Image (tube, rainbow, N blue to C red):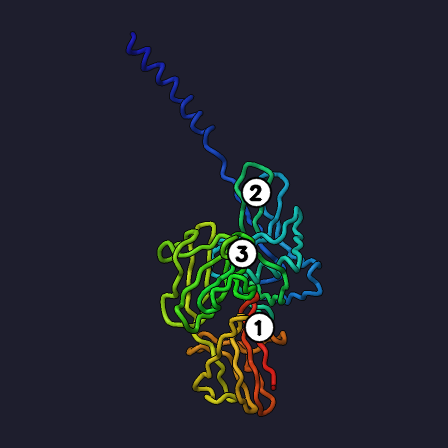
Amino acid sequence: MRVLSKFLGLALALPLLWSCGEMDMPPIVQQTPSTITSPSEGSSIVLDQAESEDMLVFEVSQANFGTSGEVTYSIELDAPGNNFASPVAVGSSTTTTVEVKVGELNRRVLAEGLQAGTSGPIEFRVRAIIDRSLRDIVGSPVTINVTPYLDAVDFPALRVPGDYQSWNPGNDNTVLFSPEANEVYEGFVHILGGSGEFKFITGPEWDEFPDFGMASEGVLSEGGDNIKIPGEFGTYRVVADLNNLTYELERIGIWGIIGSATAGGWDTETPMTFDAAENILKITADLVEGEMKFRTNTWDQNYGGSDDEGVAGFDGPNIVIPADGTYTITLDFKTPGSVLYTVEMN
């Protein structure tokens, strides 16, 4: 009888166990992300400094979380191909109309590497956030071509004294900038001769501010050894991360002028020299009526004109030289997100 009672109890419990299993199964909720409906994929936005306080309007579709609640729509951007590894939010709203300030968008796209006066692609997407314990939903990105303007905002700076500029930390021109104000500094250093050594320092005096040098290749330490360029002389893109104490060096090449207006025609560059006081590349040369560009020894690195006077465009149109004469020409990489140039007849 005891055995029969045990089997009978088990038989009676099975329906209850089955019933509990069914009750514990969570319902499947279909969710729909929000996407940008305006501006549309492939459209263009030209930013204007005179409108820096104005608002750009992004229209987005309504997200569906499968439940009720207040939804916030946030517009995010990132550089193309980065898969939104470092998304930046530029505006948000609890409606499907999201406003983004022109000046803020301009600052952000310059920080992503766009050149002032030159159209470039930026990816945008919508992050939908609900006031419930549910994960955010992100929509598919759209690519929009944005033309930023030259912004005179003062960014935090890191000085780069070295042999190339007489080891002068007080030179306000030989600096890197941090557009995000996050202790990550980036810019260009022109090292065309000497020992090729330099350091980073946070202020204009050696004895009063921390300086950073090399602990090992790619690694910084306070008061470390001089950093030396790893290869040939030229212009280097430099990144210094004081949070993680790392640095990066990428050689761009030696810049020169080339074109039908120059002595070497379209075959050979005439190299520019370095003005250490101004931290610009410079050349005085006899030119003839024709056209010219700035180039390293490869067309992969070249600048021409742009829609903004005095702002060089990467792979931009040829610069017209209107008449024969002696010209002084400069190329300036100091401004974050922009390359500036001048062509003046003497």
Q: Quadrant of the N terminus?
A: top left
Image coordinates of residue 281 in percent, x first then y, are 51, 75
Classify residue 265 as left or right of residue 217.
Answer: right
User: Could you tell me which secondary element the residue under label 1 belongs to?
Assistant: strand
Amino acid, disc 1: Leu
Q: Reading the chain from its start, which is encountered first: label 2 or label 1? A: 2
Q: On residue 340, which mark appears?
A: 1
The image shows residue 326, relative to residue 139, as above or below, that is below
**40 or 231, nearer to the observer:** 231
Query: In the orientation shown, which residue stands out farthest toward the top?
Result: 1
Disc 2 to disc 3, C-alpha distance:
51 Å
334 displayed left or right of 197: right
Residue 248: name its quadrant. Answer: bottom left
Determine whether 333 is above or below 185 in the image: below
- Residue 157 lies, in percent from the top left, at 55, 58
Residue identifier under label 3: 203
Graded by Cα atoms within 10 Å as few (under 14), some (14 to 19) or many (20 or more), the crowding at tag 3 reads some
Q: Is residue 125 visible?
A: no
Disc 2, disc 3: CB below 8 Å? no
Amino acid bearing label 3: Gly
- In the current view of this chain or complex, which residue is farthest to the front? 207
Q: Residue visible at 48% across and 78% down?
A: 273
Q: Residues within 10 Å of mark 1 (few under 14, many from 20)?
A: many
> Which image quadrant is residue 220 in?
bottom left
